[in-house]
Image (cartoon, rainbow, N blue to C red):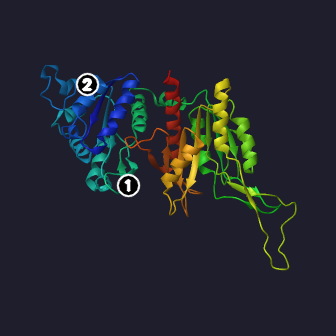
Amino acid sequence: MRIVLGVGGGIAAYKSASLLRLFTEAGHNVSVIPTEASTRFVGVATWEALSGNPVSSSVFDEVEKVNHVRLGHEADLIVVAPATADLLARAAAGQADDLLTNTLLMARGPVLFAPAMHTEMWSHPATRANVATLRSRGVLVLDPAVGRLTGKDSGAGRLPEPDEIFAAAIAAVAAGAGVPASEAAASEAAALHGKTVTITAGGTRESLDPVRFLGNRSSGKQGVALAQAALEAGARVRFIAAHMDVPAPDGVELTRVESALELREAVHRAAPGSDVLIMAAAVADFRPDRNSDTKIKKRDDGTNPVITLVRNPDILAEAVEARNAAGASGAARPSLIVGFAAETGDGTSEVLDYGRQKLARKGCELLVLNRVGTSLVFGQDSTEVTLLSPQDSAAAPAPTYTGTKTEIARRILARVVRELDAAVAVP
């Protein structure tokens, strides 16, 4: 496929190098068209080296090839990332004052913009109107991610991660190249076809006596959303449900559990033969050292009962250890394990610090980090997560996503698919 990658003049331009690599490694021929301003952030030599094609921002280079007409006509897809407020305005107005805007006017295939700018710029009425104009013309304009921006503040305006842009771009080609909607949906639905995904959900309950238990506030909504997204992607889903406020989706292989020990046993049974294990359940860290056979009574002397807690097994870490040990023997175990962490900050460390520490301890490939608190995450329909992996770095930080739990589930599954594909590609 012939792709034009337009690069706007923003600090996020460095991320587009990773996007370019995704396109080229997938076998596509990419022509990069940076704006003049963007070359102050990433130089022309970088784009030429990574794409293997000559790079220019001027309509007066290689005039004999009529690039300002040819590139747009020949492109199967045009992706602009980052798309600055200025670039969106020029595209909406139909300006043609450089090679990129000329190429956009000549486009005959799908066009995708991935915006990146400061929050106030994104929310400004002029930008919103420009985005609405472009979308009304059939152009795909992604919503920016929410997270740390240039400087000390955070908010909406962060460039979506390269793998998200890549996935959206490929989907845009399927939708915009004459593929019937039903076939495009079928293609998307086949992303996990033939794969078995085991998902845990809900909150465990640790019995004190026949009446009482120690529990947590998990509703199971995120786990259910993950199961539904996996089913939609064509997977066979083994669903291990602790206490949930919502029903399990139809079509899963359902196992009901109550305590952490029951969940542990179910995971050890289900993990062999699974391609992916997603540990979304909120598992109690501790349980009472004994479970009374009779109801614990109030004492007439006014003394309070003493409940001693003991540590529950680390089910996620055990699953990783079992998988790694099985790898040497060739036994079927999940090639990808995704953990969840519900954290709060304190006077010692921030939420992200605790998440990174947990990722290192558990040894899983991905860790979905939630900042929890009053009216945050548990029982809510929307959430914010940071998706941690051992490959995170200052140059490629962990992405943060905000949205409904259904939207977040699809983002997590999209990352799972990419990780599985990358594992297959490694010789």
- Which residue corresponds to mark 1? 155
Residue at 70 percent of width and 49 percent of height: 242
- Which residue corresponds to mark 2? 73
The disc, 2 or 1, on the residue closer to the chain's N-terminal end is 2
Is residue 121 depicted above or below 347 in this figure?
above
360 left or right of 91 in image: right
Question: What's the amino acid at mark 2?
Answer: His
Which is more toward the observer, 277 or 76?
277
The image shows residue 422 at horizontal and vertical percentages of 49, 28
Locate the N terminus and report the quarter of the image it occupies.
top left
The image shows residue 262 at horizontal and vertical percentages of 76, 46
Residue at 70 percent of width and 47 percent of height: 313
Disc 2 secondary structure class? helix
Q: Kindly indicate whether the residue at mark 1 contacts the one at mark 2 (C-beta within 8 angstroms).
A: no
The image shows residue 214 at horizontal and vertical percentages of 72, 60
Query: Separation of disc 2 and disc 1 at Cα?
Result: 37 Å
Q: Residue furthest front?
A: 348
Disc 1 secondary structure class? strand
**From where the camera sits, is residue 112 visible?**
no
